[in-house]
Each structure stands twice: as structure tokens, then as C-alpha cells.
């Protein structure tokens, strides 16, 4: 396999433009580049969660070992999403990506009690990072939606990003509950 990234600093983007995979030059502030950047940021946010998750005592994780596998699969899939955004005439996303994440959400959510109110993030470091990934997934989804209002974007990308925010909400709840079954929840102030 050839090296894909042999020269990191090229100077090509110094004028505020970059090239898509098909060679088309676009502004770095274009909707497409903003969407690609948000997806890249989501991948990094998931990496932050994974690093925090790896610090959790393995004894606590015995019934949730599929979380790490899911994160690895999602991070890989996000490169497909970014590739599809960078090369709009191609389809890179796995055919099973949406059904895989939906299955994961259902299987993990079944182990959680229903919620009465919004969960306040910050129960522990892993949970806080999962909540952060959830928020970044929502932003990535919004950026791809903005792009789809101007250019053609696969509906699968929108669905997948929407499911990812759901998945990381569930992951945040699970990892938070590893330390305490009492989830901090919003208390509506009476005004």
C-alpha cells in the first residue's frame, strides 16, 4: 500500500482554499469543508472518549465490552463519511453502518432505566467525554444538513450522524452509571 500522507505541510492552503478529493478547489469556509471539519472533530471527540473509557476499571466494564468495539467501528466509518463528503460523486459509507449503530443503541439502551428529565453531563470523565462526543455529533449533523440544503448529500449520512448522537447519549448514561446509579438530572426551577 502506498503512503497516503507523505508531506504534511504543503503551503497549498495558505490562501484560504483547499482541494476536494476530485481536485476541485474550494474555500476553507465552504459548507462542504465545514461539514468535513465537523466530522473530523467528531472523530477526535470520540477518541477523547475512548482514551477516558480505557481508564475505567475492567471489572466495571464486563457487560459493556461492545462499547469499545462500537467506537472503533464508528471512528473508521467516520473516515468513510468524510471521504464521501470530500468526493461527492462516490459512496464510501458501509451498507450496514446505520443498522449496526441502531442495533448497538437498542441493545445498550435496554439495560438502562427510563429517564424522567434531562441528564446533567459530568458524572465521570468517560461519561463527560461521551456527552461531548454527542454534542459534536449534533453539530456535525447540522453542518451536513446545511450542506444538503445547497448541494446533494446522501440521506444515509444525515441518518448516520443523527444515530451517532443517540448512541453517545446512551454511552454517556452507561459509563456515568458505572460509578453511581444515581444520574444527575435537571430540576426545573419553579418561577
Image (cartoon, rainbow, N blue to C red):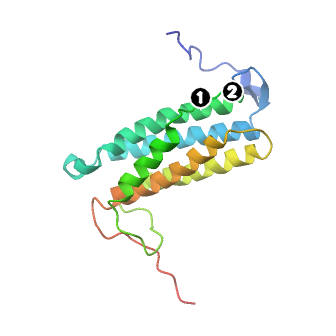
Q: Residue 100 in the image: state x and y as whole percent.
A: 45, 42
Does residue 64 appear in the picture of this structure? yes
Q: Residue furthest top?
A: 2
Residue underneath mark 1: 92
- Circle nearer the viewer, 1 or 2: 1
- Depth check, front residue: 54 or 161: 161
148 relative to 105, above or below: above
Decide: is 86 above or below 7: below
Give the number of marks.
Answer: 2
Q: Is residue 125 visible?
A: no
Q: Residue at x 56, y 49 (%)?
A: 137
Q: Label 2, secondary structure: give it.
A: loop
Label 1 vs label 2: CA separation?
9 Å
Element type where label 1 sits in the image = loop
Q: Position of residue 31 (x, y in %)?
A: 75, 41
Residue nearer the viewer, 9 or 69 = 69
* Residue at the disc numbered 2: 87
Check the picture and name the quadrant holding the C terminus: bottom right
Can you give x and y, in whole percent of width and height, for residue 32 in the image?
72, 37
Label 1 vs 2, first from the N-terminus? 2
Is 97 in front, or is 27? 97
> Residue, x 36% and y 63% (percent of image)?
123
Amino acid at each position: 500500500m502506498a503512503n497516503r500522507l507523505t508531506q504534511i505541510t504543503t503551503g497549498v492552503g495558505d490562501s484560504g482554499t483547499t482541494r476536494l478529493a476530485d481536485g476541485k478547489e474550494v474555500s476553507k469556509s465552504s459548507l462542504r469543508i465545514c461539514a468535513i471539519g465537523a466530522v473530523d472533530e467528531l472523530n477526535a471527540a470520540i477518541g477523547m472518549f475512548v482514551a477516558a473509557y480505557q481508564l475505567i476499571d475492567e471489572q466495571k466494564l464486563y457487560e459493556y465490552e461492545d462499547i469499545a468495539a462500537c467506537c472503533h467501528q464508528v471512528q473508521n466509518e467516520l473516515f468513510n463519511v468524510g471521504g464521501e463528503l470530500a468526493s461527492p460523486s462516490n459512496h464510501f459509507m458501509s451498507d450496514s453502518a446505520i443498522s449496526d449503530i441502531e442495533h448497538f443503541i437498542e441493545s445498550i439502551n435496554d439495560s438502562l432505566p427510563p429517564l424522567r428529565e434531562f441528564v446533567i453531563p459530568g458524572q465521570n470523565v468517560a461519561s463527560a467525554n461521551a456527552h461531548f462526543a454527542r454534542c459534536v455529533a449534533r453539530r456535525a449533523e447540522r453542518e451536513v444538513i446545511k450542506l444538503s440544503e445547497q448541494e446533494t448529500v446522501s440521506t444515509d449520512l444525515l441518518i448516520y450522524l443523527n444515530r451517532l448522537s443517540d448512541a453517545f447519549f446512551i454511552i454517556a448514561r452507561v459509563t456515568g452509571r458505572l460509578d453511581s446509579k444515581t444520574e444527575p438530572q435537571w430540576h426545573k426551577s419553579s418561577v
